[in-house]
Image (spheres, rainbow, N blue to C red):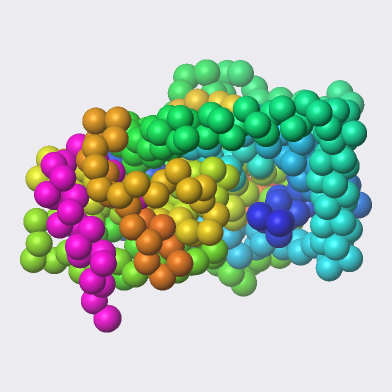
Amino acid sequence: MSCDWTTKIETYVDGELPAEEVRAFDKHVRACPTCAGIALARVQMKRTIQSAGKRFKPSSEFRNRVQQRISKTRRNRVISIWTITPAVLALVLIAVAAMNYLGSRHGQTQQFYGELADLHVSTLASSAPVDVVSSDRHTVKPWFQGKIPFSFDLPEVQNTEFSLIGGRMAYLHQTPGAQLIYAVRKHRISVFIFNDSSLPAEGNPATGKQVSFSTDTWSQGGLRYFAIGDANAADIGALVKLFKTPPTS
Amino acid sequence: MPLFDQLYNFAHWLTQNRDEAEDLVQETYVKGLRGFASFRAGTNFRAWMYRILRNTFLTSRTGLRITVPLDSESEGPELAVDPETPETLAIDRSNSAALQRALDDLPVHFREILLLCEVEELSYQEIAETLSVPIGTVMSRLSRARKALRERVNFEMRPHTTAAVNG
């Protein structure tokens, strides 16, 4: 006995089904004992593999050995660059860099926001835009535990025009962070959160228009937030305001 | 060191040997550090590291290739679910040892995709980047890997039928 949904059960259990199909499947599974049974078995199997698969742990000696090896490699790279490169050339490069510094800042900022826009657009273009699909901030926030080296608060968007779609991991300048996707009418807004100290200074300019997207950025509790989307600046501003005054619970 | 525990666990499952796993992880970090310039911001760091580890594993074993029968994946995703049996439903945490043995016995291309999906919790997109295959292939290979694992676990849990199966 089977129905049309059985082909999508694994994708559903893996959290890879598009949001609209998840809602339809949730509804279907309540009325279909076959699908409910298979989905339950799949979830059970998934949890068992997850538990059985975390089997091997590195020893602390090995961890220290790799750390030492990496430090040595880093040191060697730095030394080799400076022994090969004549000191005079280095000084010239520094002088040129200093002369170009002011002029290049604008370009760097553009590039920085270009990367954020790339992340935002590629996320929306993906078949699975979010890794954790939920409109509940109490589901989305814990999903990031252990995946990023910090924690953050999400605002309550109930009774506002915004809705939370979900979240995913994001990487910017080799720094792991969180990407939250919000919807306002037909628009999508990404809010990126990174450790403030890990990012370069290019991301400093605040509210404005970058690469045709509305953007805003602010720092809060040692974290750097970026909001970017095709919504108008007022919508972005309203979402940012919600973030800046998170609820206590 | 980011992902150290996860990469080691994955390496040990791939190599099935502690010394080889340690060599593999160490080489992955050294290569990652050397190749950091080639890492493009905005691409997935996790998938990038797992890809380095996997490629290092493949090249470290002369002649080893993860061979996947072409006929099994050329037609894209086939996610039809088999009817459940009581044995399948009985797979739970108490059968962890049987499941570990079954995972050990799986062909490496099934073992690695199950680990990446279930244990490392990579998304389909990240797995596709790690294995350098399309997402459709990820879905169909995952489905087949799960089926193969279920069959092996069922076999592990029914030692009394071994003679009948073999004979």
Q: Is residue A173 visible?
A: yes
User: Which residue lies at the image location 61% right of the left edge and 18% below the top edge?
Assistant: B70
Seen as rendered, the residue at the extreme bottom is: A248
B115 w.r.t. B109: above or below: below
User: Which residue lies at the image location 48% right of the left edge and 48% below the top edge?
Assistant: A201
A193 w.r.t. A119: above or below: below
User: Which residue lies at the image location 73% right of the left edge and 40% below the top edge?
Assistant: B32
Q: Nearer the viewer, residue A124 or B84?
A: A124
Q: Quadrant of the C terminus of chain A?
A: bottom left
User: Which residue lies at the image location 8% right of the left edge and 66% below the top edge?
Assistant: A159
State the extent of the magenta-drawn residues as a range.
A226-249
| Residue A220, horizontal then vertical, whole percent | 37, 66
Q: Nearer the viewer, residue A210 or A136?
A: A210
| Residue A2, horizontal then vertical, whole percent | 31, 43
Q: Nearer the viewer, residue A113 or A193?
A: A113
In the rendered image, which quarter is residue B71 located in? top right
In this picture, residue B139 sits left or right of residue A110: right
B124 w.r.t. B63: above or below: below
Q: Is residue B162 visible?
A: no
